Amino acid sequence: MINKLVEKIQKTEAPIVVGLDPMLTYIPEHIKEKVFAEYGETLEGAAEAVWLFNKEIVDHVYDLIPAVKPQIAMYEQFGVPGLVAFKKTVDYCKSKDLVVIGDIKRGDIGSTSAAYAIGHLGRVQVGSKEYVPFDEDFATVNPYLGSDGVNPFIKVCQEEKKGIFVLVKTSNPSSGEFQDRRIGERPLYEYVGEKVDEWGRQCMGENYSYVGAVVGATYPEVGKVMRKMMPKAYILVPGYGAQGGQGRDLVHFFNEDGLGAIVNSSRGIIAAYKQDAYSRFGAEHFGEASRAAVEAMKEDIQNALRHK
């Protein structure tokens, strides 16, 4: 799957992943009024609103981007109906030939980790039959329980030719409370980066590994170090736009060939219609606003890479 991701990035010339992280506050009133009239103000109604919101955005951006990243917590908050909306979103995005990165941030040990890996990336046996449960192409993984928590995902990646992105240095302000702690002369995140490189050599695609890393756009100097430390790992870069990252902050995450990184924007795209820059579209045309936001992000990143 890493080969497909690289190919789609090259085809679209857009190293961009749209984070499908819907909150009810992002969803225009006309959608909520429609579904609440049918389902009431219920979990089922909220989940249907999320699904319709996602579909409209995907319909407007799928030809511009290589990948999407639904964050499962935004669906889980609506219980079982929310998970149904998550699965419908995954399936619809794949029908549009988008690579789907399941932002699940799982990390446990033994059979528990294996169950997470099977549920999101692999196949589960039910009697004489085999099923593919959620069927994302990649998943995000928390490595802080060690190799016991990561190896089951690597095993499924090898079997299914899918991939993971391991949390190395996250974009949130308090990430340094643990990730920046120094062990000897180096911060903890560098040791995690070394393990990502080690794990990645177990399952290589054509030029990049099926094991990638998450490094936040809000820490560009860390990106420079990690790019050298993990030469074969694709880097998923959150923190663009709403969290403060800009195209000029991203250049060090990329290799000289312009590959090696994919940049995530969530509410900066899916809630673009709420921004002054895109308010002309209005809530009724929120999908068009999202498309314009993707186009602006693509131009920003391309300009930054041209002047690297």
Image: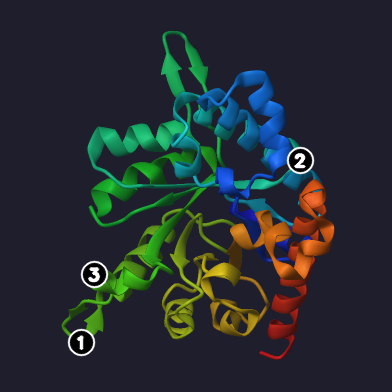
Instruction: Identify the residue at the far left of this view.
Output: 184
Labels 3, 1: front one: 3
Label 1 residue SS: loop
Q: Is residue 22 visible?
A: no
Position of 245 with respect to 196 (left or right) is right
Q: Residue at x 74, y 47 (%)?
A: 57
Labels 2, 1: front one: 2
The amino acid type, in three-letter code, at marker 1 is Glu
Position of 30 with respect to 159 (left or right) is right
Q: Position of residue 286 (x, y in %)?
A: 77, 51
N-terminal label among 2 and 3: 2
Q: Residue at x 31, y 39 (%)?
A: 113
C-alpha distance separating marks 2 and 3: 39 Å
Check the image and report above or below for 125 versus 111.
Answer: above
Label 3 residue SS: helix
Residues marked 2 and 1 touching at CB (< 8 Å): no
N-terminal label among 3 and 1: 3
Mark 1 Cα within 10 Å, few/some/many (few <14, many 20+)? Answer: few
Please name the residue that numbered disc 2 is placed on. 96
